Image (cartoon, rainbow, N blue to C red):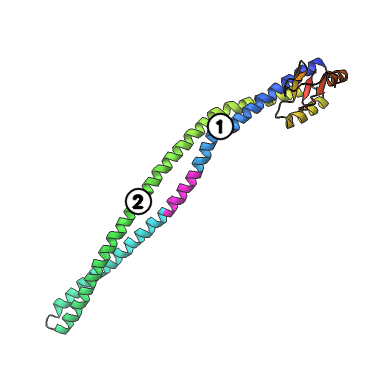
Amino acid sequence: MRVATDDLAKLLILQQVDLGGLAAQKQLDELPQRAIIADCRKKKQVLNAKLDKLAELASASEDEISRIGEEDAKLAQKQQRLQQEIDAVKGDFRSVGARTKELNGAAKRRATLDEKLTQAYAELEKIDAVITQAREMMQDVVAKEEAATAEFVEKGSALKEKCAKARAERAAIVTQLPAELVREYEKVAARSGGVAVGRLNGSSCGVCRNSIDAGRLVAMKAEGNVAACPHCKRLLVL
């Protein structure tokens, strides 16, 4: 393949621009903040699910406390009514005995409810403590995510600018090169990690470093000033 000297120079510049753009994109893709942000978002999902579950447990405990309170209040009213009835029928021992038995039952039930209420408050206190802990963890995760996001925006913006600049420079150079040469370059670059063009270094490929035998080299030069390396298949400037 014979390529004009100016086109060869532009092709080598194009490769440097492309490699710079690839390096910037690789840095952008590998910014550690990406992993930190993703990890924080995952932790936030877990914590939100935990907080939702804790809210349900807290609501259930509060409902239990409310139910116990309502039952206790009704029993207190019942005790008051029974005591009034006992006071009103002092001479009727049978009536007094029946009401006294009922009054004792109410008192016993209220004692049981008092134990349950203590347990319910203790359970709610535990749940509230875990909720507080989970919220503090959420605040830490959110702060970490915000810090990582700010760093990513700062560092990522500079890298994105490099990528954009490389694309613009590339577009300008490509318009100045023969379309067939660009297609061949891009085909080779796609399969060789972006390094599509190398220079002959003595009798060796400047990229893969493999030596090319003298007879083969003479034949390659006879065909033009650019040929495919017989080893790595890159475009070799002879």
Pointer 1: what residue?
Answer: 31
Q: Secondary structure at mark 2?
A: helix
Residue 54 can be seen, yes or no: yes
Kindly report the distance in space between the C-alpha atoms of the residues bearing marks 1 and 2: 38 Å
Type of secondary structure dominating the magenta stretch: helix
Measured as percent of width and height from the top left, residue 131 is found at 38, 49
Measured as percent of width and height from the top left, residue 188 is found at 76, 29
Magenta stretch encompasses residue 52 = yes
Image-quadrant location for residue 226:
top right
Q: Secondary structure at mark 1?
A: loop
Magenta stretch encompasses residue 149 = no
Q: Against 73, is 207 above or below?
A: above
Residue sitting at x 29%, y 60%: 119
Ranked by sequence position, the earlier of labels 1 and 2 is 1
Query: Which range of residues does the magenta coloring cover?
Result: 42-53
Which sits in the foreground, 221 or 133?
Answer: 221
Query: In the rendered view, does 201 fall on the left or right side of 141?
Result: right
Q: Which mark is residue 187?
A: none
Pointer 2: what residue?
Answer: 128
**Residues packed near mark 1 inside 10 Å, few (<14), some (14 to 19) or many (20 plus):** some
Amino acid type at mark 2: Asp
Query: In the rendered view, does 64 fall on the left or right side of 178?
Result: left
Amino acid type at mark 1: Leu
Q: In the picture, which quadrant includes the C terminus?
A: top right
**Residues packed near mark 2 inside 10 Å, few (<14), some (14 to 19) or many (20 plus):** some
Query: In the rendered view, does 234 fall on the left or right side of 141?
Result: right
